[in-house]
Amino acid sequence: MRIVGGRHRGRRLVAPPGDQVRPTSDRAREALFNILSHGDLAAAGSPVADANVLDAFAGTGALGLEALSRGAARAAFIETDRAALGALRRNLAALDEEDAADIFAGDATRPPRAPYAATLAFLDPPYRSGLAAPALVALAGMGWLAPRALAIVELAAKEPFSLPEGFAMIDERRYGAARLVFLRRQGDRR
């Protein structure tokens, strides 16, 4: 697994052994960031550049690290698994991104109060866990998502997903076993 774009392009990321962590494939990550950089979502400017980013269910941190590589200002990572947290810390150190990152060892469905609101969020819960919608609600309630924040949720390709109140679906893409759902948090434009 590697960073696919930006200043850290080609740098390897470590993952813990076993199948507890399922990192987003390089192919899906590259497609996702191409959409963010060159698709309709980038019409008013890149949603990644200078953004505060949230990587919930972070695992190795691949999504948040990819965002930092491509110009995000700061990234917060939420993860419960100890082995994944160790890999995340090693990845941050290897890329010299510790100063731009905040790690929260905890559950994205019961997050602490946010130190800052993210304008771009990635949620990659375990497939078929049903945790995506409850996490979105909890994260919004604890101040992790700015009004009008863009949230991208990775699910299994055929996994059911109920859109939570306060969010609008704006796009959906499939990449092999994965489905990316693009959501916009509803709210004023403050």
Image (cartoon, rainbow, N blue to C red):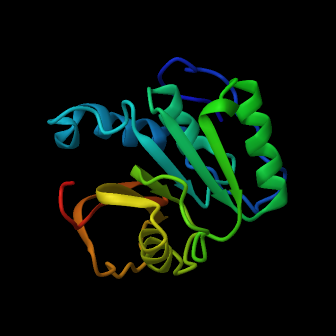
Q: Position of residue 22 (x, y in %)?
A: 66, 56
Q: Quadrant of residue 158?
A: bottom left
Q: Which residue is drawn at 15% across and 36% down?
A: 44
Residue 65 is drawn in which quadrant? top right
- The residue drawn where x is 65% and y is 29% is 97
Q: In this view, does 12 lie to the left or right of 100?
A: right
With respect to residue 22, does 30 lie above or below? above
Q: Looking at the picture, tell me which residue is in the foreground, 34 or 152.
A: 152
**Residue 128 shows up from this direction:** yes
* Left or right placement of residue 123 versus residue 2 in this view: left
Quarter of the image with the N terminus is: top right
Q: In this view, does 8 lie above or below 166?
A: above
Residue at the spot 58% in from the left edge and 20% down from the top edge: 8
* Residue that appears at 44% across and 26% down: 71
Image coords of residue 162 (percent x, y): 35, 82
Tell me, yes or no, if residue 181 can be seen here: no
**Between 129 and 189, which is closer to the camera in this rendering?**
189
Residue 154 placement (x, y as % from top left): 46, 60
Residue 167 pos. (x, y %): 27, 71
Is 126 above or below relative to 11?
below
Foreground residue among 35 and 141:
141
